[in-house]
Image: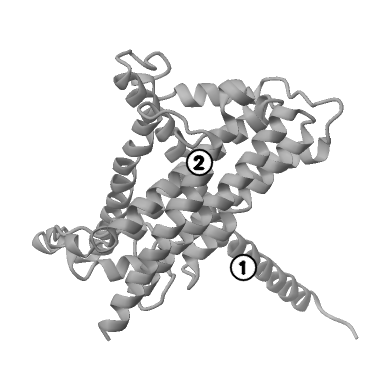
Amino acid sequence: MIMDTTEIQDINSFYTVESLKGVYGIIWVLVPILTLILGITIGVLVIVWLEREISAGLQQRIGPEYAGPLGVLQALADGTKLLFKENLLPSRGDIRLFSIGPSIAVISILLSYSVIPFDYRLVLADLNIGVFLWIAVSSIAPIGLLMSGYSSNNKYSFLGGLRAAAQSISYEIPLTLCVLSISLRVSNSLSTVDIVEAQSKYGFWGWNLWCQPIGFIVFLISSLAECERLPFDLPEAEEELVAGYQTEYSGIKFGLFYVASYLNLLVSSLFVTVLYLGGWNISIPYIFVSELFEINKARWVFGTTIGIFITLAKTYLFLFIPITTRWTLPRLRIDQLLNLGWKFLLPISLGNLLLTTSFQLFSL
């Protein structure tokens, strides 16, 4: 069979078009993910700067001021410094586990951002089990911390890893029960988009903060413990364990733990906004602005931008609570921390779930 030049060119052009379609498909998948990662990175830098400024204000000192305007680039300078520092490895430790541990902690928290809606159409994965996916994936992070503590061949690191695992198990159960109480109010849905939409029916007074005040307080305390923020920073208590599971780490691996703690803080604040503070909704009818000036084609872009702004504004306003508690409350002992989780928060969250279930049954 003899093929002429025209047929060969047609076949080659067909394969070229198909390969370009495949490349464009991959790019189309990667663009939202990379955009989200870029936004998360900027968000973490803003949190670090906010914490330093608020801490300086509480302690009546100046705070960062030389790296960029108002010290905005200080966190970037610290990250660059850690990137170029020497990466030391323990001579008698398990090198593979030692290297994998920080990566597991960061990746498990990054996966949680995939189910957070910043607007009705602006969510990476709108799943029916969105909130439970966050709880399940975030519970992998303590495994990375335990691996890091065990592989360091250091008793302080190992104790820090054990404390991180025990603390995570103790406070995940009340956290899950609070989420179940909310899902019962939202037609048995665990989708983050459905939960926000259910709160938008009655405006400001429809937020779950007013319907679930007990659950909100338990969720707040449990999320602080999950983030290992003061007064729950027992896994890395400086006075007792040097630096806990981070003791033997240096360079970029130490920087990954630092990033993981702030990623966890940001994702917890975002979930508080989504579950209790109405997400992107606000009672001000902002959408009428576009109708007033007859820019109906830009309504979607305008509404999405406002939705993202409202979500981030609520999140960063809520962040003042964990940042302020860091400098106002003393650290608990390990027995007090576990007693608070098992003897107080667990029964309270169970009672809250029972009350919510009873109310839903009697309202049918």
Residue 107 left/right relative to 341: right
Q: Which residue is pictured at 67% across the width and 20% down the height?
A: 85
**Mark 2–mark 1 distance (CA, rounded to whole Å):** 55 Å
Q: Earlier in the sequence, mark 2 or mark 1?
A: 1
Q: Is residue 85 shown above or below 285? A: above
Label 2 crowd bin: few (<14), some (14–19), many (20+), radius 10 Å: some
Residue 247 left/right relative to 202: right
Question: What's the residue type where badge 2 is placed?
Answer: Leu
Split into 4 quadrants, where in the image is the N terminus? Answer: bottom right
Which percent across, then down, holds residue 13? 69, 70
Q: Which residue is pictured at 42% across the width and 28% down the height?
A: 330
Split into 4 quadrants, where in the image is the C terminus? Answer: bottom left
Which percent across, then down, holds residue 5? 79, 74
Q: Is residue 9 shown above or below 218? A: below
**Pointer 1: what residue?**
21
Circle 2: element type? helix
**Pointer 2: what residue?**
337
The answer to whether residue 91 is seen in the rendering is yes
Q: Which residue is pictured at 50% across the width and 46% down the height?
A: 339
Residue 167 left/right relative to 71: right
The answer to whether residue 193 is seen in the rendering is no
Label 1 crowd bin: few (<14), some (14–19), many (20+), radius 10 Å: few
Nearest the viewer among 296 and 312 is: 312
Nearest the viewer among 56 and 116 is: 56
Task: Pick out the residue farthest to the right.
Answer: 1
Front position among marks 2 and 1: 2
Circle 1: element type? helix
Nearest the viewer among 281 and 317 is: 317
Nearest the viewer among 343 and 229 is: 343
Q: Which residue is pictured at 62% across the width and 40% down the height?
A: 163
